[in-house]
Amino acid sequence: MQSLGIFKEPANESRVSVIPDTVKRITQNLNMEVWVEEGAGVRAGFTNKAYEEAGAKIVSNSNIFKNSEGLLSINHLYRGEEVEDGKSFIGIYNLMYHRQRISTYQKSNLSVFSLDMVPRTTKAQSMDVLSSMASLSGYKAVIKSAELYGSVLPMFTTAAGTLKPAKVLVLGAGVAGLQAIATAKRLGAIVEAFDVRRAAGEEVRSLGAKFIEVPGYTENTSAGGYAVEQSPEYLKKQKELIHEHISNASIVISTANIPGRKAPLLIEQASVECMQPGSVIVDLASEQGGNCALTQDERMIEHNGVKIIGSSYLAKEMPMASSQMLSANYFSFIKHLKQQNGNAANDPILQGCKVIENGELIHPAFIKNLTSA
């Protein structure tokens, strides 16, 4: 692979996959040509001129397809346009959940790397787009909920009296959850957190939050640090305990997700109706159904005075920071791909995220998932 094309994302996307500083590293360190679609970085604060000064050529969308061997985007953008054989799409496509997207790529002799499937290993850490975006989303969830909440997060003591600190409940203590905990604690809130994984308890407590644990969980060490589906008995106990804690919470931030599956339902409508008016729920699992029964993806609604925000991509609201982090992830991946000459046969990182090769679905876990659907 000797050339890369960077697409302009759709109107609802403010980020860009590669920023000018990274273009410079690609052209100089990897000796590759870079083609950038006109206006690709504008919404993230990066001008066409900045890309040109970094060594890229600014071209139209059709010329990206024509001139580039590696086609880079954040979102799934390909709609079946005519493309020469042998090209590779690289992005964050969430194909395990959005299965209908697969057939588009199988119509042509194309290859697809979906970076959300990069293995969670030490060697692949610098390519981990999910952790990068989850960290920013967890931070933004607290900032956004603090703006919408009807009171303050820290305790306020003034001549006029004392305002009690807000109680924040975080559901899911992965990357997003831990960042939300740390941010809420820094802002002075009382924080509790729930996760099915016992190992998460130590991390939660180290940040100064209380860990809520439900006995009887199931763990799977091969799940790459993600939660796995639980038994019906466990889920019943889990919902009862979460309901108890939600009724006392001012802000709830839910981050629980299972890759390729519908998000677990953790917040029933009855639980929402137990919260005080003016409270806020931020559901970061909304793309995959949401953790709250009332969540609507990419919308904010209000129910009984409780605001419910559904957004799996709050990181989009910080496009400059998000693009900088994603760009570093993409560079690490492109560098590794080039070192391996694009051959996934003996490389666990490429094997983990190469879903389609020359139009054929090759990822074993993906094939198993489709077969069992």
Image: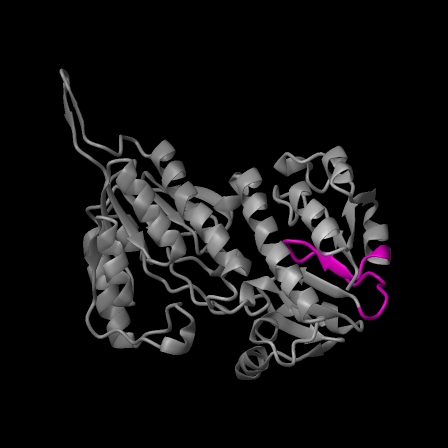
Q: Main secondary structure of the magenta part?
A: loop
Q: Quadrant of residue 69?
A: bottom right
Question: Is 148 in the magenta?
Answer: no
Give the x, y percent position of residue 191.
23, 46
Pick the front one: 266 or 324 = 324
Q: Is residue 310 visible?
A: no
Q: Quadrant of residue 240?
A: bottom left
Compared across the picture, whether 39 is left or right of 132 comes to right
Above or below, 243 relative to 216: above
Residue at horizontal 24 percent and vertical 61 percent from the top: 201
Instruction: Check the image and name the residue furthest to the top.
Output: 159
Pick the front one: 206 or 137 = 206
Give the x, y percent position of residue 104.
73, 68
Compared across the picture, whether 146 is left or right of 115 comes to left
Identify the image quadrant of the C terminus. Answer: bottom right
Pick the front one: 268 or 350 = 350
Identify the image quadrant of the N terminus. Answer: bottom right
Figure disc tally: 0
Instruction: Check the image and name the residue furthest to the front.
Output: 29
Residue at horizontal 63 percent and vertical 53 percent from the top: 74
Residue at horizontal 24 percent and vertical 58 percent from the top: 242
Magenta range is: 67-86
Give the x, y percent position of residue 219.
32, 75
Residue at horizontal 69 percent and vertical 75 percent from the top: 343
Give the x, y percent position of residue 109.
80, 73
Above or below, 290 relative to 303: below
Above or below, 43 relative to 100: above
